[in-house]
Image (spheres, grey):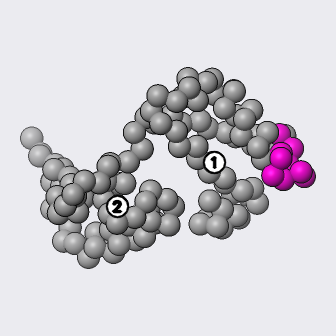
Amino acid sequence: MTALVDPQEFGGAALIYLPKYVPSGDGALELSDGAIAQQFIAGLQRMYPHFHPSDVLDLQISRVKYVMALSTLNYSQGLPPMQARSPGLHIVNSAHIVNATLNVNDTIALAERALSSLLNAPRPAVPQPINR
């Protein structure tokens, strides 16, 4: 992830995303955060012999049973709107990714396309406070 953000933003540290996608019934979802952290840290040590567990400044574990919307026939013709019901609120997520997989490149490309159209969209009127 550090390739996306200048390491200076993190004080020279690196931001690393380590996904492990498993079926919704997989036992890995039942493991403690500590057990999952140990598995990932052990894997990093095997891949990078110079890596030491003390190099980890922070670690967050997230468990999500369903990661992305499943595309069905003609899915792209009925995408949810990015403009929410609340004026000025836009939602862009993996449900908007079509003809691709859920990965960082596709997500960034989607966000860039959405940002471009959002920046060019008319701004909603800001409600004025009621003076009583």
Q: Residue at x 66, y 32 (%)?
A: 36
Q: Please rate how many residues cluster around mark 1, counting C-alpha atoms within 10 Å: few if below 14, some from 14 to 19, many from 20.
A: few
Using residue 73 as the reference point, say whether residue 64 is left or right of it.
right
In this rendering, would 62 be left or right of 132?
Answer: right
* Residue at x-position 59% and y-position 36%: 61
- Foreground residue, 131 or 120? 120
Rendering quarter of residue 5 = bottom right
* 8 falls in the magenta region: no
- In this orientation, which residue lies closer to the viewer: 14 or 95? 95
Q: Relative to 35, is 61 on the left or the right?
A: left
Mark 1 and mark 2: Cα distance apart in space: 21 Å
User: Are circles 1 and 2 on residues that touch, CB within 8 Å?
Assistant: no
Please name the amino acid that badge 2 sits on. Answer: Ile
Rendered position, 52 above or below 114: above
**Nearer-the-camera pick, 95 or 127:** 95
Give the residue pinned by disc 2. Answer: 97
- Residue in the image at 12% along x and 45% along y: 131
